[in-house]
Image: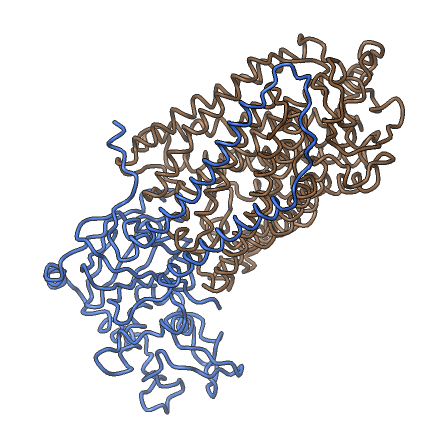
Chain colours: A blue, B brown
Amino acid sequence: MLSGIPLLPVQASTLAPQVDALYYFIVAVTAFFGILVAILVTAFALKYKDDTGLKVGAPITGSVPLEIGWSLIPFFVAVAIFAWSATIFFQYTRPPENTLEIYSTGKRWMWRFQHLDGQREINTLHVPVGRPVKITFTSEDVLHDLYIPAFRIKADAIPGRYSSIWFEATKTGEYHLFCAEYCGTRHSGMIGTVYVMEPNDYQAWLSNGGVTGGSMQARGEQLFQQLACTTCHLTDGKGRGPSLAGVFGSQVKLTSGQTVIADESYIRESILAPQTKLVDGYQPLMPTFQGLVNEDGVLSLIEYVKSLNGGAGAAQASAAPATAPAQGERR
Amino acid sequence: MSTTAAAASPVTYLNEKTTVASWLLTKDHKRIGLMYMLTVTLAFVVGAVFAGLIRLELATPAGDLLSSDTYNRVFTAHGVAMVFFVLIPVVPAVLGNFVLPLMLGAKDVAFPKLNLLSWYVFILGMTVTFSAIVMGGVDTGWTFYPPFSTEGSDSNVMLAGVGIFITGFSSILTGLNFMVTIHRMRAPGLTWFRLPLFVWALYATSLIQVLGTPVVAITVLMVALERFAHLGFFDPRLGGDPVLFQHLFWFYSHPAVYIMILPPMGAISEVIACFSRKNIFGYSFVAFSSMAIAVFGFLVWAHHIFVAGISPYSAMVFSFLTYAVAVPSAVKTFNWTATLYRGAIWMRAPMIWVFGFLGLFLVGGLTGLFTASLGIDIHIHDTYFVVAHFHYIMVGGAIMGYFAGLHFWWPKMTGRMYNDTAAKTSAVLVFVGFNLTFFPQFILGYLGMPRRYHMYPPEFQVLNVMSTGGAAILAVGYLLPMIYLTYSFFKGEQAGSNPWMATGLEWTTQSPPLPHNFADQPVVTEGAYEYSKREMKVA
């Protein structure tokens, strides 16, 4: 029976072997110190045992060199672990260029994913092997957490802001996808499967995906018309609202005098709470679209705004690298 | 040493007055300590029953014993009962209340009426919180994260919150009382560096209780205001920030871990010195490490929220400080180990509990190196790895330390001995049961099993079954002391004033002590652990 117990999860991303190597190192370090103390305690307990209770111990009160030694050695070991950990952590926070963008919304108790071409799926996620994938996500209600153990990644889905994770899958197969932040009744049912596919199979899946309503960009454009955004956000910049061409990823000056980078979170905030960070030179005329457009719609609108930057790589021209995106932006 | 005190003086704090009113209106720290012991034991039994339900449910992957809603209420009740009503008060309020004035050579704590008030506030808070559990329960987890706790949950969040708010004041008042007592009530000659290390530990703990608890009280109040008055502190739809709650909550709740573990560490120092018949190795380093842990403990809270969207740079600072706080804990462990060297180790029951503590605390502390690591915490955050880690510290460390202290001071508290073999058996059962319960959870966590899961994928079952089996052994280990200690209270053989031949002022008065502790004011002329200068003879 014991041989049937797995000890490590499958390594299926580029980060997984690195995380596991650090894990082995800490296992070795802690085992060394743990066994050392255990051996000493056991040896002393056996050697200096006294059944009468009437003897007294040696008059030893301490040793300053020993104290300094066993303060400094653990400290340096800890600093070494810290430094190694931090280098891995920065890989988590800095996705490579040209990631495949996927958007997701967590909602009690399901994960919805949207691909740029318009495919939508619930509690399943199809990704190609060997290509960096970045998932940008938020929550529609309470906190959730997107966790894929085989890739060793997770991040909280926080209502009101975007988080992101990235991974490059290294092995085709099916892997667990969990919600790791407690979210109420069916928290343990908020799970799904990640399908890592060969690039060709992934392309085939994309084209058989039964897309309705076109790509995310097309859906965004449609919403942009329907919600009458076009009335004010004229492309020539003469409207009551600023032109959105070239805005994504740029520095925007606000009426408060501050500048912000127009990333996903800023665009989202400007749609749902337009008065919070008003662009310099414009009147606070825009109404909130809270309740008129859902999180998936907001993501499509963002994708459309990105496309207004022009050029084929627009969707990838994320503001991400400048803003340490894996953890989302604090406001 | 006064070997005949117990026989010569029949008046004790237990038999001076015996009416119910004399207990409920007592200002005697020793009686208040015993009253806390009964209340905390009751909360422990409640928390343990809920723990049993969790382990039974998790024996199979399907959710076949409880509904999901019930399961969520059960693990919340387990956490709330254990954290707020067992782990935080267990050592300071029970053992601290009983022995602190005795250790200082004082008649009582500085504010005896306030001490009684603390107990009543505790009872009130516990009644309110437990009534929330009885009236249908709470399903937010003991962490009460918004927006689930403010908007998402329709359970008795408010009532539980109010109960915890009230209970906090009991903790603040006890901390305040102990600090003043330690400053003002020391016997002549009892300088700071002659204080027993348990007193240092209580002092450090009191500092955290006084400084940290108001923060969690305010935070709970903010949740209440958001829930009822829709003031937007935490819910983004109201303009709030859910991560703000996590900062405020952990600003208290991380130091609260040190409220739980520092006092047992202090008790361990007392027991280890006594049963090794030696000075504690590096007394001042052990004393200052308690203070260092109390101070650094306030600077590490954000290591609970590495994946909650905090800036990577602040995450690095908090990770580094977390590694820094590991050093004083390591120093203590090395000093305890070195204390055994060339001792004369008397293997009585309290010492067996100490060995259990050392083993479990070691695993708990060392696995903290994994959770503090930024690269690894992303993977193991909110998994069973974390569940195992904090149980090793908070149950393996704190409860083992409590039992070590309880078995050490029991003869003083009751004037009677317990069955040594039964007590050793219990310590071994707890150690074995605990490891079987929680060690598999480290593996489960690294495999990726998230915590607070009612149902789980079938490949995790074998490890979960081991865990459930271990919990059964653990339950027997915890039940035994209730039996042999109760028997000892009524029928145990007379202990005499100092059955362990221990140093320390508490052992110079009779067992159980006089109502006002000492017949004459004790005077201190030497350090706390001068065992090697003693002539040992059976009391």
Q: Position of residue A220 (x, y in %)?
A: 27, 72
Residue B237 is left or right of residue A170, and the answer is right
Q: Determine if residue B15 is in view.
A: yes
Q: Position of residue B225 (x, y in %)?
A: 59, 53
Location of residue A17 with respect to B86 vertically, above or below: below
Dividing the picture into quadrants, the one containing residue B491 is top right
Location of residue B334 with respect to B22 vertically, above or below: below
In this figure, what is the number of numbered marks?
Answer: 0
> Quick one: quadrant of the N terminus of chain A?
top left
Q: Position of residue A215 (x, y in %)?
A: 20, 70
Closest to the observer, A28 or A214: A28
Closest to the observer, B1 or A311: B1
Dividing the picture into quadrants, the one containing residue B230 is bottom right
Q: Position of residue B1 (x, y in %)?
A: 81, 18
Q: Determine if residue B38 is in view.
A: no
Dividing the picture into quadrants, the one containing residue A44 is top right
Residue at the image point whose x is 52% and y is 60% from the top: B317
The residue lying furthest to the right in this view is: B520
Closest to the observer, A103 or A130: A130
Residue A258 is left or right of residue A151, and the answer is right
